[in-house]
Amino acid sequence: MESPSDEGRVTESLDGEWLFVTDPDEEQRALADPETDWSDVDAERVTVPHAWQEDETYREYTGTAWYRTTVEYDGAGDRVFLRFGAVDYEATVYVDGREVGTNREGYLPFEVEVTDAVSPGETVVVVEVTDPEDLSEIPHGKQGAPWYTRVSGIWQSVTLEARPERFVEDVKVTPDLDDDTATVEVTVDDDASDQGEDGRGLDAAITVSRDGGEVAAATCEIGDGEGTCTVSIPDADYWTPDDPALYDVTVELRDGDDAIDATETYFGMRSVSTDGDRIYLNGEPFYVRGALDQAYYPDTLYRPFDDDLFEYEVRTAKELGFNMLRKHIKPAHPDFVEAADRLGILVWEEPANPTIYTERSKREVREQLRGMIDRDYNSPSVVAWSLYNEEWGIGLDQEDYSMHDGRLWNDEEKQEYLTELFHETKEWDPTRLVCDNSGWAHVATEINDYHEYYVSPDRAEPWADALDDIAANPGDNYATENTPAEDAPILISEFGTWGFPDLPKLREHYDGDPSWFSHDFLDSPLKRPEGVDERYEATDLPEVFDDYDDLAEAWQRREAVSLHGVVEEMRTHEAVAGYVVTEFSDIEWEFNGILDYLRDPKEHLADEFATVNSEVLVAIDPERHALAPGDEVTADVHVVNDTTESLDGELRWSGPGAEGEQSVSVDGFGTTTIEDAITLAPSADAATGAHTLDVTLDAGDREISNEEPVFVVAGETPDRTVYADEPLAAALETEGVAVTDDLDEADVAAVTAVDADVSEFVEAGGAALVVPEVDGRMAESDAFDYRNLPAGESWNLVSSLLYQDSDLLGDLCSDARVGWAFEDLFPHDLVEDLDASADEIHVGSVEGWIANWGSPLVVRDRGDGRLCSCTFRVTDRYGEHPTATALVDRLLRSL
C-alpha cells in the first residue's frame, strides 16, 4: 500500500492495466476464481478507467464483461475498502474469489468493505459488470437510442483504501450567510459503538482554514455515529465565480487524547435564493449566462481525454462569458465539480433519465439524485438540481412528443409523485434551488424554465412575441401550480442554433468517419452523418461553396448571427432571469456547440458569441435592418449590466449616415435604455449594400463594443408590363409599375397561384413569378412541391442554413448566408423537388447533415417559358419593405 492520505488511512490507486473479457452468454462464472487462467478466454489488457465502447470491437456490445487485476496488500489498516468512482451499470466485486459486494448505478461512487476477504500478499480483484441492452428502466441519460454512443464498464478510478477501525465516514458543511457561520455534520463509521476504550465518547476536532491560516476551530461530541457543531467564520469571504473563495476543513476523530482518524474536505460560503423575479447569489442579484454541457468526449466518451481538460473547459467557458454550466442529464464527473469549485463557475446538475415510468425507474432516479446530492453537498459551485428533463422517464417518449394520457401535463398521479420528490429533495438539500422537470409541465419548482428553439433573424419576431407571452403567462408552463408560478424566476434553459463542424478535422482525428456517423438508431439524415458526401454532391452546395471548410464558415457565421439575435432579445427582456444555450460543445452528430467536439472554439463563432455573452452588453436595436436610400431610421441602445456596479461613460456610434456620441450613466444590475439614441440616414443616392452599425461604450476601465448589420437597399422599378393579382397588383401600381389584368398584354406575370391561364401563358413562352398568399403560405401547384416550415419554434430550423450564390441577391447579403436584410420576409414554405442540373436555384436550404434540401427562390423551365417560385413573404410587403420591393422588382425584370 502507498499514498498515505489522512491520518490512519492509506490509499492505493488500482488504475492502470487490468485484464478484460466479454461474456455474452454469461457462462464464465469461473472467472471470479483467482486460480482461473484468463488466457484461456482470450482476455485483453485494458487501462482502467475504461469504457469498453472506447474499443471499436465492443462499440455495440451489451451484456456482461469481466475485469481483473492483482494488487500487493501489505496488511495496513484495521479495515480495508475497495472504492469505485463509477461503474456502468451493475457491478459485482470479488476478492480472491469471494463475492464482497454489488452495486447497481452507473454514475456515482460506491465502496465495498473487503476486510475479511484480503490478507497480506497478492490479492486478486475481479469485477463483473453487466450493462443490459434494455435501458428503459435504468437512469442512463443520452446513451443509445435516439442519441449517442453507449458507455459501459469501470469508467472512473478504483482505489484500495486501508482505514482505522473507527473512521469518519462523511462530513457535510452547511454555510449560513445570515450570521457568517458554518455547520459541520460528522458521520462516523464505528463497528462497535461510539464509546472509546476508556468509556468516554468519541469526539471530532474541527479546524477551518483559509489559504493555510486557521479561521475557526471547534470540537463536537459523537453520539450514535453522528456529531454536529457550528463555527463562526469571521470576515467571511463569499464564494462567487469571480472570487471562488474556498475554506478547508480538517476533521480529526479522537478517542480521548488519541487521534484515531482524520479526513479533509472543503466548502464555500455561498448562498443561492430567488424572489420570484431574480436569482440571488450571496444576496446579490445574479443573471445566469449558462451553457448546456453534456460531457461526452471523442474516444473516451464520459472521461476527459486530457488530465487538465476540466480546468481548460472551465477557463474557456469563463472566457466566453459563461457563469454557469448545466451538466445535462447525468451527474457531473467529480473532477469537473472540483475544477468548478476551484476556478469559479456555477453548476446545475441533474440525474440521468430512464425511458419509462415504473416503480423501479422511479426508485433508481431517486437513489441517484440522493447520491449526487450527498457526493456534491459541500461544493459551492453546485447551485441547482433538476429532477427530470422534458418529462423523459416520467411521461414522454423521446421519439414522440405528442400529447397523450400519460404525459405529466395531465396525469395527476405523476404530478403528485414529482411534487413529493421536489419537497423530499428540498429536505435533503435546502441550500440549493430545485427544478422539478426542466423545460415545461412544472408542478413544484423554484425555477420556471423553458426550452425554446427559435432561429434569428428567420423567426426573430415570433421569438420576441414568445418572450412577451412567457412573461405575461408564466403559469401556462405548469401542469399544476403546487408551487406558485409567480414565485419562480423565468429562465430559458435550452435554446440554440447549429453550426456545421470542421468535417476534414474530424475525419483526420478519427482517421476516417467515426463510428457515431452510422448509429443504427439515427434514421433521419438530419442526424445521421453517414452519407453526407453523397447528399452534399446531390445538391447545389458544391457550386456555392469551395469545400466543407467554406460551408462550415458560412454555417458557423449563421450560428453566430442567430445566437446574437436570440440572446440579445432575452437579455433586454426584463422578465428573463437568465439563459442556458444549447450547447457548450458539439456532441457526436449534434453540431450546435460553441466549441467543436474536440473542444476547440469554433473559429467563426466563438469571438462574436463572447461579445453578446459578456457581463456588460451594448445591444443595438434598430427599427428595422433594411433601409431605402434617404430613409431615416432610429435605433435604441440597451446597455445590459449584469454587475452590481454602475457605469458612467461615453457612447459612440457610426453607421450609414450616422456618427456621434453622448454621455450615459448605466445603473448597476439591469438594463439601461437610451431610446432613439441613433438615427441612420443613408443618402438619397446610396447604393445597395451591407453595412454595420458600430457602437462602443467607453466607461473608463471598460470598453464595450458591439455591432449590428444594416442594409441599404435601393429600388429598381422594372420597365415591364406585369399581370398581377391582389394585393400585389395595387402595390406594384403604387410603385409606378405598369400593371395589366390581361395576360396577352403582359411581359411577365406575378401571381399567388398558377391557374390554367397562367400555366398556358408560361408554357407558350411567357414568364411568371409565384409568390406566397397573404398568410405567407404557397398555394398548391403542379409546378412545384412545397414543404411547410413552422412559423415559430422549430428544432429543424435551428439546424438549417439558408444560403445563396446569386447575382440577384449578392448585394443583399453579407456573404453566402441569407440574413437580416430579409427580416420579416423569411419563408414559411420551401420548394423541395429540386434538380441541381435543371433548376436555377438562387437560394438553397439544408438542415443538419445535409438533409431536407429545399429552396425559397428557384426558377425552372415550363414548356417554352420560365416559372419562378419565390416563397419569401413579399406579397403584402412590396412597396413597404425595401428588400421585398427590390427582390420582386429584380425578379420581374430578370424573368
Image: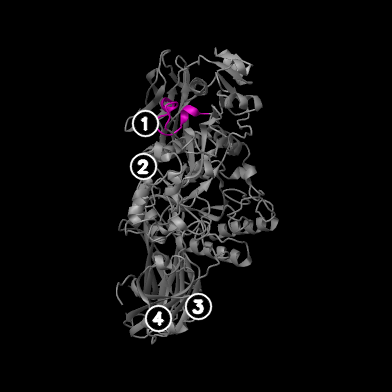
Amino acid type for the residue under numbered disc 2: Asp
Amino acid type for the residue under numbered disc 3: Asp
Disc 4 to disc 3, C-alpha distance: 13 Å
Judge left or right: residue 147 versus residue 36: right
Q: Is residue 496 above or below residue 78?
A: above
* SS for callout 1: strand
Amino acid type for the residue under numbered disc 4: Val
Q: Tell me if residue 775 is in the magenta stretch.
A: no
Q: Percent x, y for residue 97? A: 43, 85
Between disc 2 and disc 4, the foreground one is 2
Disc 3 to disc 2, C-alpha distance: 48 Å
Residue 442 in sight:
yes
Between disc 3 and disc 2, the foreground one is 2
Q: Residue at x 51, y 74 (%)?
A: 224
* SS for callout 4: helix
Q: Which circle marks residue 547 in the picture?
A: 2
